[in-house]
Amino acid sequence: QVQLVESGGGLVQVGGSLRLSCAPSGRTLSTYGMGWFRQAPGREREFVASITWSGGTNYANSVKGRFSISTENARTRWYLQMNSLKPEDTAVYYCAAAQKYSMTYVQPYEYDFWGQGTQVIVSS
């Protein structure tokens, strides 16, 4: 079973930046899509950003212009650069990988593998 490992979470002040990274452990994973979701206490898991095999990106409206998703050329590792962080960005962030073809990768069911989550806390 492939495990995805996130890193880069932590505590940051309002307006600060963090960079999350995700990579499969144990072996290389062939993916069509890669994404990030988040879950705040008492709320459902929500889509944050995704990047397709062809380099197309999608973002939740709440993070557009502040967050950026990217991947290395071989799609073996992907990142979420988070700038201008707000208290409402506080959540556990999960990376995900899809081995099925899709156009956008914005729904959890489109993904096959998930990380264990990394906590992001934005302090005011």
Image: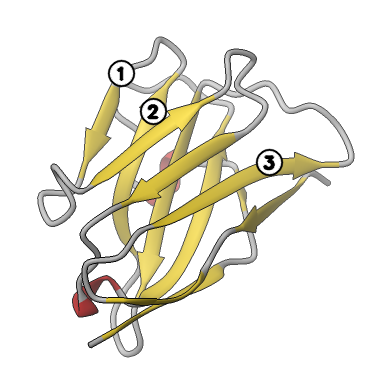
**Which callout, 3 or 2, points at the residue further toward the start of the chain?**
3
* Amino acid type of the residue tagged 1 in the rendering: Gly
Residue 91 x, y percent position in the rendering: 38, 75
Estimate the spatial distance between the alpha carbons at disc 3 and disc 2, rounded to whole Å: 14 Å
Q: In the image, what residue occupies the spot 29% across and 26% down?
A: 57
- State yes or no: discs 3 and 1 in contact (Cβ < 8 Å): no
What residue would you read off at disc 3?
23
The C terminus, quarter of image = bottom left
Q: Nearer the viewer, residue 93 or 100?
A: 93
Q: Find residue 48 and name its label.
A: none
* Amino acid type of the residue tagged 2 in the rendering: Ile
Q: In the image, what residue occupies the spot 57% across and 60% down?
A: 8
* Amino acid type of the residue tagged 3 in the rendering: Ala
- State yes or no: discs 3 and 2 in contact (Cβ < 8 Å): no
In the displayed structure image, the side of residue 46 where residue 9 appears, left or right: right
Residue 123 x, y percent position in the rendering: 30, 86
Residue 15 lies in quadrant: bottom left
